Amino acid sequence: MACERSSEDIHRRSVDEAAPMTSSYRLPLAGALLALAFACMHLGSEYFDGGVRSHHVLNRADLPEISNWFGLIILPVLGWAFGVRLRNRPGTHRSIWVGLITSLAYGAALATSFELGATDITKAIFFGLLPLAIIAPIYRAECMLGFVAGMTFIFGAILPCIFAVLFASLSAALRVGFLAIRKRLRPNRGASTPASGSRR
């Protein structure tokens, strides 16, 4: 009986320890699987419509081509990062989803204007990323996933991901620099002040 109880206790402990670990991976795994399904849908539509496409870097024929098959890696990675952010920010899910949808619409608008040949609109949207990198935290996972997903059906995933990483790096560097400057300029509240009532 003692052996049976001890084995049951060990089993219960292992289940209790495994439960938090399993739940901690639930959102990241769901994000990765949904992003993978999106990538498969995109690649499937291309495969049955003449084959999976490749795109020249900067749309120049003298530069290398990059296959859209890379979307099977890039999108799930971004989806996993998005799920991690949802898991780590339980009280801000609404703002995270707003960031995802807004970035998705921005990327889709950029890709659509390019596809329709609206050069001026395309330039305005693209260079609009510079002020956005300054005023908004576009380095967050939801912004990168939304932007890349919004452009995937026109450009594939890897080219938008390259631009997303560049502008996200700029945004993160500016934010870190701003916080460092603000911290330096802020007066040290913990500094000791001389006693006003001291007398000689």
Image (cartoon, helix red, strand yellow):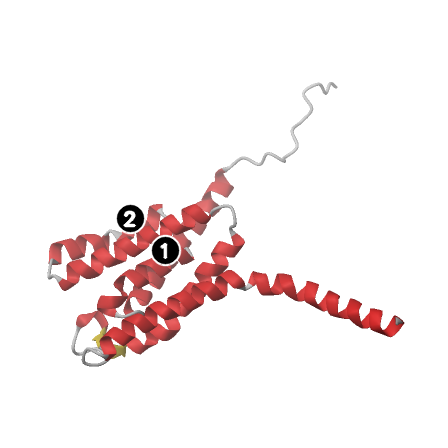
Please state, as top left, top right, bottom left or bottom right, where the C terminus lies in the image.
Answer: top right
Instruction: Give left or right: position of 8 versus 97.
Output: right
Establish if 92 lies above or below 59: above
Establish if 20 lies above or below 133: below
Image x and y of residue 120, in percent:
12, 54
Whether the residues at callouts 2 and 1 have beta carbons within 8 Å, the answer is no
Please state, as top left, top right, bottom left or bottom right, where the N terminus lies in the image.
Answer: bottom right
Closer to the chain start, of discs 2 and 1, is 2
The answer to whether residue 20 shows anywhere in this view is yes
Mark 2: give few (<14), some (14-19) or many (20+) Cα within 10 Å: few
Task: Please tell me which residue is depicted at 69% across the width and 24% down the height of the picture.
Answer: 195
128 or 150: nearer the viewer: 150
187 or 91: nearer the viewer: 91
Image x and y of residue 182, in percent:
47, 41
Q: Nearer the viewer, mark 2 or mark 1?
A: 1
Task: Please tell me which residue is depicted at 74% across the width and 66% down the height of the picture.
Answer: 12
Image x and y of residue 123, in percent:
17, 56
Label 2: which secondary element: helix
Q: CA gap, disc 2 to disc 1? A: 15 Å
Amino acid type at image mark 1: Cys
Label 1: which secondary element: helix
- Residue 148 sits in which quadrant? bottom left
Mark 1: give few (<14), some (14-19) or many (20+) Cα within 10 Å: many
Task: Please tell me which residue is depicted at 15% across the width and 53% down the height of the picture.
Answer: 121
Query: Which residue position holds label 1?
Result: 143
- Residue 17 sits in which quadrant? bottom right
- Residue 45 sits in which quadrant? bottom left
9 or 100: nearer the viewer: 9
Task: Please tell me which residue is depicted at 28% across the width and 60% down the height of the picture.
Answer: 150
Residue 131's disc number: 2
Amino acid type at image mark 2: Pro
